[in-house]
Image (cartoon, rainbow, N blue to C red):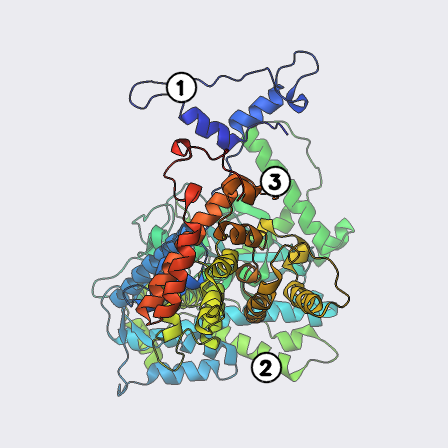
Amino acid sequence: MIRPLSSSEYTQMAGRAGRRGLDAKGYVIILVSSIGKSLKSSVTGLPTEGVLRSVILGTQTRLVSQFKVTYSMILNLHRSSSLTLRDVMKRSFMEAASHRWETEQRQHLSFLNKKLDETTTLISSNDSNQTSVNSVSAFTENNDDLSESLFVYLDVRVKCPYNGIECCDSISAYYQLCYRYRQLTQSLIRTLSTKYERYLRNIFCPGRVILLHVTIKQSVWLVPGVIVNYYWETKKNGKDQLLFRAILWKLPTDSPTFFTKKQEGESETSAVVGSNNKISTAPVGEDNHSWYNCEYDEIEEKILRNIKGSCNTQWEETPVPPHLVPVFMPSSLEDGYARVTLQSILPEDSLFRICDRIVTFENKSLKLNMNISDCLLHSIKQHQNTVNRRETSVNLPDDNNEHYFPILNDVNLALFNSVNSPQHNSSFCVIYTTLSDNVPKQVDITKELKADKIDEEDVRLFEEYSTINDQLTYPLSISDTTTLNSNLLKCPNLLQHLNRVHQTIRRKLTIKKIETNLADYQLQLSKEYTGRLNVLKELGFIDSATQSYCLSSKGFFACELIKKEVVLTQLLLDGFIDNLLAPDIAAVLSVFANELRPYDFSLEKKSSSYLKELVNSIDRINSNTNYVSNNDLDLIPRHLLPVFKRILNCAYELETLQRFHNLIDPYLESRFDLRLVPLVYKWAKGYSFSATIAKCDLPEGLLIKSLLQLDELIRHIVGACRQFGKHILSLKMCEARNLIYRDIVSSPSLYILKGIKSVTDD
């Protein structure tokens, strides 16, 4: 059947069209005549454009590795200790992509371990300072998951980026407190939204003041907000999540930002967490990314993010506490009013504090005859229209309802009062480095929820959240004489030290995942190798009693053979051909000479019962009872059937073991080409080539090739017999080899052999 060339075939032909080093290009001529009808256009007779495009520009056939594990390979590699089969498999084309992956993973592992060595030191077992341990146990006594996840990865002392000493003893406990706070925030939102949905409006009522952290240009700022309403949104996984609509200030993207100025003799941490909240006049750029993480490494971040399963989203960002996050506040009430905007907020990720303050609009909402949420939504819409009109100079329709603006004024003032007193005389936007001491208190969730019944577990959650929220919201104070606080205040830069602890955990998580991946990594044929190795052990080819799995005498004998070495060794050492004549030996060994492939077998011959059926057929032939004609057995000389029964039983035993160990194509080692037996028997008896091939439908070339392979097989058997002292058997083998290695088989070329066709039968 004529078919179009595949793209790979065409590319190979085109590559040979030009002479290397002589021609700039090669030419491929596509002939029209003799093209099959499937390629012809009904009009011109030429191949269609689609066919030509597919041939010339089609996808190349992917290379498929033909590497496979064989018994001969295993035996010969166990014979020599210089190379293992796993090394051979790793170097195969089949494992090329996996080998590149493994090399890359080991490079990542080395890179991360080097980073860890540079930024951490081991904790001495007799270290007298137990501040970190005591603090950590206090913060995590009610959270086994937290203890399990963090204690394992904080078994080292994290160095301070600015060479602080005392802070290193307390930074781990401080980090775990911050991480616990983030976990509690997420648990709080999930608990309220799932178990107390009916009472959510009591907590997240319109006008409730909240503190949020907002990210802009990879920088985190603390911004106050006022809740408008809440709603649910369905995520990709089908679960619903709670979101807020809140009014807050829009952060600038192009104006300079300012931080508290470090006084002479004062550490950077004192400037950051102190209570004076002085304003500096030194700009530090558009974002605080360098201040937030001075050790940011793009290559490392790519490794940490791309290792599958190493870091989920909760580990991507450092759990920065509220009292270390810069607070944004506009320069004046007028500037703040211009910045108010409506945003959707995901509380699990953005909520810092639910305040006990509520902005009231009762008189205004009653006057407008609508609820508070609608008042706020209409007010912010009116405000945005006004801002758009100013920016675009477009005459947008005016809304004459003058009550909307006072509502936003109340909101803007509440935002100012929640973080600090308004500043009127500054010409720039103000950035405070910490919250003031008069920050609104955390709402009493248990009391404010007003639920009919609250589980004790949830009460503990609310109380723990409120306690840690107060610890991490109010500024660290020098007056606090606890060891934890005093050590943290001595840190030159607490935020960067905290970030380094977070990076240390991410690195250790990723290292553990890489090591797990490398430990679980298996070569594609490792199961096949293990299965074949177990087969050889059970059959006695490999001594399993030795640690290095040395070969037995049977294994060394099999190493000398080249085809079907397992079955053939079993039979030869059992003496199955000791009493046979030379022509019979040649005929019997012919079944081992021809190499069969999976596509040579029908489904019937691949069946596990095929060999058993052949053995039963031989028994019926010998007993002359109920025999059904079998094409594989009919041409075999009757006196050789008992020998073939022995061969088939041995092959059946091997196939049973191979199927038990789940080998690929377990029938290949136990199937034989019986068509050659009568032909080789005739040839060994002295028949001419024409007489041998006359009554057979096999091609002449296949018979010659099989006879040459049989000659090579017998030559290897002779060498093995001589090496192991079986001289009588080797002489019989030599005689059988001489019988088949004659005439056309021994001719160096068919063209110089005369009289092949003129030879007649004897």
Among numbered discs 2 and 3, the one appearing first in the sequence:
3
Residue, disc 2:
460
Q: Position of residue 502 (x, y in %)?
A: 39, 66
Separation (CA) of disc 1 from disc 2: 81 Å
In this rendering, position of residue 411 left or right of residue 82: right
Residue, disc 1:
26
Q: Position of residue 46 (x, y in %)?
A: 62, 15
- State the image quarter where residue 393 is shown: top right
Which quarter shows the N terminus? top right
In this rendering, position of residue 176 left or right of residue 283: right
Which amino acid lies under the numbered mark 2 shown in the image of this protein? Arg
Separation (CA) of disc 2 from disc 3: 43 Å
Among numbered discs 1 and 2, the one appearing first in the sequence:
1
Q: How many marks?
A: 3
Crowd band around label 1 with a 10 angstrom C-alpha radius: few (<14), some (14–19), many (20+): few
Separation (CA) of disc 1 from disc 3: 68 Å
Residue, disc 3:
384
Comparing marks 1 and 2, which lies closer to the viewer? 1
* Residue located 64% across and 51% down the image: 407
Which amino acid lies under the numbered mark 1 shown in the image of this protein? Gly
**Looking at the rendered structure, which numbered label has been put on residue 388?**
none
Is any part of residue 339 visible from this angle?
yes
Crowd band around label 3 with a 10 angstrom C-alpha radius: few (<14), some (14–19), many (20+): some
Which residue is nearer to you in this view: 608 or 97?
Answer: 608
